[in-house]
Image (cartoon, rainbow, N blue to C red):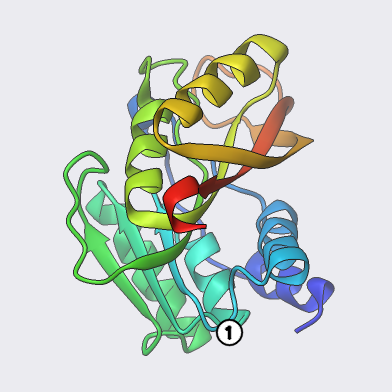
Amino acid sequence: MRLRDLEITLESMKRLDEYDIALEQYPTPAPIAASVLYAAELEHKDIKNKIVCDLGCGDGIFAIGAAKLGASKVIGIDVQSKALKVSQMNSRMFGTDDTVDWVLGDVSSIQLCCPIDTVVSNPPFGVKNRGADLRFLKTAISIADVVYSMHLAGDKNRAFLSKEIEKLGARVTQIETFQFPIGRLFEHHRKEKHLVDVDLYRICIKERE
């Protein structure tokens, strides 16, 4: 599947009708999700024939994208049941039911029955709920060999997260910075679209390299 074909597929997904500010739900745009997954496979072979987990899956855009790129199995996990209903609807629409399982659960307490090769995650930025992004990272590093995770850009945050990742027995192998568009999702949003600088981390767990 070409990058543009994957992007077109993901653009046709159903998205959530409303978002929870307490969970810092910011939907990943299809072009970004497609680019992250495509690069993960093209540059590192981290998707095809791998067991992939979409941690905090929301409407399932990473999970379904990974399945379309040839992942052998995908697990989408979210704490919100209505998000998983949308994920399941999307999975049926794209014919990925045999590949993707959906799990309702909190990121801090999930227990999986199979080893995970790759986690792809757009976690909360930790602005409203301080430390939420780090909780996602800890879980991702504990269950997978390789992690792709999005976080607010900036030298201070990058230094902090890199240090925490080292403490968790992992290392950052790549950071890519891009602009993440956030639409007018909540009452306090005044702009139709706000661009936020985001870092995408590729993280490898040292003992499993």
Q: Nearer the viewer, residue 52 or 141?
A: 141
Q: Give the camera-side residue of 121 and 140.
A: 140
Residue 97 is drawn in which quadrant? bottom left
Position above or below: 43 against 9: above
Q: Quadrant of residue 5?
A: bottom right
**Residue at image point 37% right, 33% down:** 20
Residue at point 48% right, 30% down?
A: 165
How many numbered badges does the structure rendering display? 1
**Residue that appears at 37% across and 19% down:** 131
- What percent of the width, then of the height, locates residue 121? 49, 48
Farthest residue in the top direction? 156
**Where does label 1 land, which residue?**
70
Who's the residue at 54% across and 15% down the image?
160
Q: Badge 1, how many Cα within 10 Å: few under 14, some, many 20+? A: some
Q: In x, y percent, where is residue 196?
A: 71, 25
Task: Name the side, left or right, on which 67 lies relative to 153.
Answer: left
If the image is split into quadrants, where does the N terminus sit? Answer: bottom right
114 is higher (above) or lower (below) than 96: above
What kind of residue is marked 1? Gly
Task: Tell me if 145 is positioned left or right of 202 in this view.
Answer: left
200 displayed left or right of 85 = right
User: x, y (%) of residue 64?
Assistant: 51, 72
Examine the rendered structure and indicate whether residue 195 appears above or below residue 75: above
